[in-house]
Image (cartoon, rainbow, N blue to C red):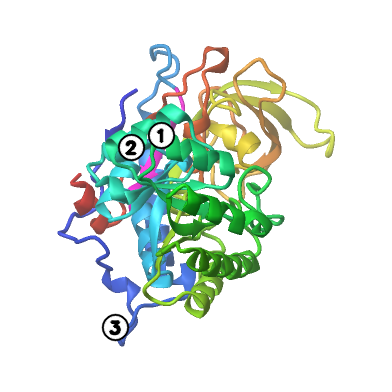
Amino acid sequence: MAPTACSLAEVCISKPYEIPDFYFDKSHHLRNNGDDDVSQPRLAAKDLVLNVLNKRAAEVDTDQCAPGGEDAFYVADMGEVYRQHLRWKMNLSRVRPFFAVKCNPDPEVLRLMAKLGNGFDCASKAEIDMALETGIDPSRIIYAQPCKTKSYLRHAAKVGVQQMTFDNADELYKIKACFPDAELYLRILTDDSTSLCRLSMKFGASLDIARQLLELAHQLELKVVGVSFHVGSGAEDPRAFLKAVQDARLVFDQAAEIGHELHTLDVGGGFTGETFEKFAGVLSDALDTYFPPHIRIIAEPGRYYVGSAFTLAANVIARRDVPDPEEPNRDSYMIYLNDGVYGNFSNIIFDHQHPEARILTCASQTDARTAATPEVAYSIWGPTCDGIDVISQRSLLPGLLDVGDWLYFEEMGAYTKCSATRFNGFTDNHEVIYISSEAGASALLEY
């Protein structure tokens, strides 16, 4: 189903990076205290999202609709993406974001990123093309894939995407043959042992071989312009940034001794909304300590921008009552949704997430969110015929759900729709309803 857009916030003229008044204190200084500063607009945004979810769900008659009419759908709040951007500017003003396209290549997200002045972290020809379709200059793309396909390298050369990473000698020979004018970033190994998704087991040159690679690049007359690292997706220890910055400083010094003129440090991703201020503080201090102001700093945030911006609604397509193994006197049911781990809940398998179900509609009661409603135990399953297609082994929800009711799941903007499949014949092309709870985002996207 084609994406739809709703203009549900007052639109005003706004420039990229313009910050609304509620982000300032009484002295007109930028606030810098994390989520507390934006709790009111975010609460209002949640109500707005919930209203749109309810309105869309109310339009569906599961007894009469055409095949797929009750499919799962998203509400995407571009205002939340915009708030995350302002939060970034307040805490990491020196670091320019290059959005990780792989996290959520939604065209409206990419369009907003381009309007905000961000760059793009791309790992394939398709991602490079999607970024270029926003109208940006190729200099705003880094081909951050240390092991690239030859034909993709030639494509990057053709479209003018010069910045790219490497971490081994064979890659340098490949680049020399396919794109000798590329601007190279040596990706170094980091300690990502505390991260949700570890990347060091696949990418990154150890400090033991960094100098050898820099010397080889110099012999091949290739231009190394920077260093990159990635502390892992969903990093949990901010000290990983400090150690990585220190290591990058050593590599910068080695490169200068060899004859390279490095001008950029890419600090990768690993940022999350929950720990952002803490991580940003450690990273900012490290950058100020080890890298003078003339060194350009970029980053590759993904889930930080979009994780909380997308909410998914799914329909209950089947139900069966089963004994509750934990509490025999409690009502217990297995419910089946028309979306699962082979679809938008792929984040359960690939991203180690645990989406939390909430009741959107429940025909058995007037208000499914009333605190006094007795809780019912559910296991929640996807629609495929595979036994691993389970969303939740046990959820306690305040209402007796039946076929045709709706559940919704917040925090579904990262590594969900982008990794959905068509397994068992179920669609991976679900409707996205775009709204904006921030006037600045509305103006940039021209809803």
Foreground residue among 35 and 10: 35
Residue for point 35% across, 31% down: 155
Return the residue at label 1.
Answer: 178
Give the residue type at disc 1.
Answer: Cys
Residue most extreme to the left: 13
Q: Is residue 193 above or below residue 366?
A: below
Helix, strand or loop for disc 1? helix
Residue 364 placement (x, y as % from top left):
55, 32
Question: What residue would you read off at disc 2?
Answer: 157
Q: Is residue 402 above or below residue 219?
A: above
387 magenta-colored = no
> Considering only order in the chain, which callout, 3 or 2, is on the residue closer to the N terminus?
3
Q: Secondary structure at mark 3?
A: loop
The residue nearer to you, when weighing 87 against 220, is: 220
Residue 411 spot, x, y in % from top left: 51, 47
Find disc 3 in the rendering and name its residue: 28
Q: Is residue 57 visible?
A: no
In this picture, residue 61 sits left or right of residue 133: right
For mark 3, does the 10 Å Cα neighbourhood hold few (<14), some (14 to 19), or many (20 or more) residues?
Answer: few
Query: Do tag 2 and tag 1 residues touch (Cβ < 8 Å)?
Result: yes
Residue 75 lies in magenta, yes or no?
Answer: yes
| Spot occupied by residue 84 in the image (x, y as percentages of width and height) | 40, 59
The mark nearer the N terminus, 2 or 1, is 2
Q: Label 2: few (<14), some or many (≥20) within 10 Å?
A: some
The N terminus appears in which quarter of the rendering?
top left
Q: Which residues are magenta?
A: 71-79
Are circles 2 and 3 on residues that touch, CB within 8 Å?
no
Q: CA distance from mark 2 to mark 1?
A: 8 Å
Q: Is residue 34 above or below residue 403?
A: below
